[in-house]
Amino acid sequence: MKQKEKTNKPKDDVIFKNLFSKAGNEDLLKEFLEEILGIKINKIEIQKEVELNKSHTKEKVGRLDLRVKINDNAIVVIEMQLQDKCKMDKRAMYYASKIMAGSLEVGQTYNQIKNMYVISILNYNMLETEEYNTDTVIVDSKYRKYIVIDGIKFNFIELPKFREQVKVPKTKLEEWLTFIDYEDMEMVKMAIAQNKLVEKAQKEYEYLTGDEATKRWQFLREKAILDERAAYINGKTRGEEEGEARGKIIGEKHGKIIGKREEKIETAKAMMKDKVKRELIEKYTGLDRKELEEIYRNGIVER
């Protein structure tokens, strides 16, 4: 029987993060990052921003970027974008600046800000350059080799360009991108055969996308929808009850005001019939001259 093609591929953000952030899979992420960044990683610490058990493959709660601390002095953020929904360059800059600012603790100086690497894996082409992996830094406009602002670096990896240019994975980076893209299954088989860590990643991927995992994600999805609906209904009911209570209080208060006014008018009428002076009527009823004139004008009481 032909194996059913999986719809959730390693480049789907939930799958990607679950795969590379799982305890015991640090070696997978370490090799992948070393190949992209071109540096030796001696220590790696995955920072889980989003609880994965609140997520599923179609909808997600919160951001699903993967944040990693490497060698105690740098932060790496990996973001997966399957569709071109915004200006990715602006977004990457904004996101990086927020994380860099947040990494500086109270009492620390600027030179203690950690280096920042932002890796954006895109399922679409964004740049006009030919390379599928664009290594970007901030340089002087005239002296291009002079890096003006050190400590921040951007990598934009465009998967369509990768598919077009690489037909046989020859480097470790090409093996990893072949697996993450998961479009050409012959190339995926080559990558798995050539790289033991990619083979390990494939086994983890099979587990994550198995029937039990799919059922679990479906359950969590339905639970999230029901919880959201319950919260809405609960909030609506509470709002209606509070509104009704406020309305009752206002109504009772308004009724008392109206009642008191009617009592004052009746008292004023009685005093008018007894020919009591207007000044005394005003004093004892609290009605002003204008209100008393209204009573006389409507012919309620003769002067």
Image: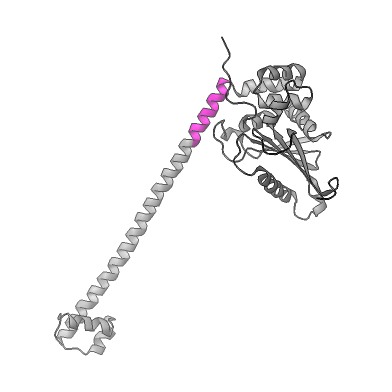
Is the residue 303 above or below the residue 22 in the image? below
Say which of 161 and 247 sits in front. 161
Left or right of residue 296: residue 48:
right
Q: Residue at x 71, y 28 (%)?
A: 162
Tell me which secondary structure the magenta stretch mostly adopts: helix
**Residue 22 at least partly seen:** no
Left or right of residue 256: residue 2:
right
Res 302 quadrant in image: bottom left
Q: Quadrant of the N terminus?
A: top right
Is the residue 170 above or below the residue 73 in the image? above
Res 85 quadrant in image: top right
Q: Which residues are magenta?
A: 210-224
Say which of 39 and 253 sits in front. 39
Residue 17 locus on image (x, y percent): 66, 32
Q: Residue at x 66, y 18 (%)?
A: 185
Residue 107 locus on image (x, y percent): 78, 55
Residue 275 locus on image (x, y percent): 16, 89
Q: Residue at x 66, y 27 (%)?
A: 181
